């Protein structure tokens, strides 16, 4: 797994991770309808953060230290590790909603996601893994129907057990 450190300053100074929240967002997002930003820069621009982003090529961008909070899931930012799956290409919210309805991850991306989540499970004894849509029902829809949730849960647990 290739890891790139791209630190983000937004988030609480301390946390004890008790859960992992899986998200999805566009790889490139529109700042103002004309300017496109890479996902890490878009989050920073909006005062948001996440612990890790997983790019389509399998690169994991580490943006916050595990013992720091990140602004990724309202009401869950002080006890969770957030990981974003980056949906390939440029997306506004409407195109993103459509993209996550069908399979959108690459093989390399899925492998890196599983590896990172397994590492966190091993390091922190985490058993609570949720989707963003689970912790914010009615408000968030990611990681979407195109994410193989049941397969993912089986794959991350296969190594742990």
Image (spheres, rainbow, N blue to C red):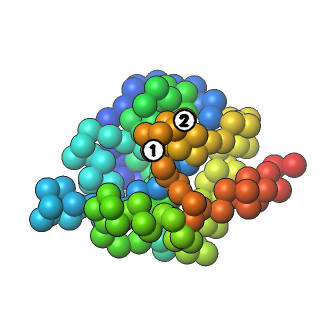
The residue carrying pointer 1 sits among few (fewer than 14), some (14 to 19) or many (20 or more) residues within 10 Å by Cα, namely some
Q: Residue furthest right?
A: 161
Query: Residue 152's spot in the image, x, y percent?
Result: 70, 58
**SS for dot 1:** loop
Q: Quadrant of residue 109?
A: bottom right
Q: Quadrant of the N terminus?
A: bottom right
Q: Is residue 7 above or below residue 33?
A: above
Dot label at residue 135:
2
Q: Position of residue 142 (x, y in %)?
A: 49, 52
Going by the image, does 121 lie left or right of 53?
A: right
| Residue in view at x 49 percent, y 36 percent | 136
Question: Looking at this view, is 131 or 2 the one in front?
Answer: 131
Task: Please state if 147 lies on the left or on the right of 158 as rendered.
Answer: left
116 left or right of 138?
right
Of helix, strand and loop, which one carries label 2?
Answer: helix
Residue with the mark numbered 1:
140
Q: Are marks 1 and 2 in contact (CB under 8 Å)?
A: yes
Residue at figure coordinates x 30%, y 48% from the top left:
43
Disc 1 to disc 2, how far (Cα)?
8 Å
Taking the spot 32% from the left edge, 35% from the top edge, the residue there is: 10
């Amino acid at each position: 797994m290739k890891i790139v450190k791209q630190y983000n300053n937004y988030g609480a100074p301390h946390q004890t991770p008790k859960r992992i929240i899986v998200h999805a967002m566009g790889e490139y997002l529109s700042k103002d309808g004309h300017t496109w930003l890479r996902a890490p820069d878009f989050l920073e621009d909006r005062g948001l953060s996440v612990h890790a982003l997983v790019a389509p090529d399998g690169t994991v961008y580490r943006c916050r230290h595990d013992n720091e909070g990140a602004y990724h899931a309202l009401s869950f930012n002080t006890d969770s590790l957030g990981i974003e799956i980056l949906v390939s290409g440029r997306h506004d919210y409407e195109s993103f909603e459509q993209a996550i309805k069908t399979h959108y991850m690459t093989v390399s991306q899925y492998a890196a996601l599983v590896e990172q989540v397994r590492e966190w499970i091993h390091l922190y004894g985490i058993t609570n893994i949720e989707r963003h849509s689970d912790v914010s029902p009615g408000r968030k829809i990611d990681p979407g129907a195109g994410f193989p949730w049941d397969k993912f849960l089986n794959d991350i647990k296969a190594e742990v057990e």
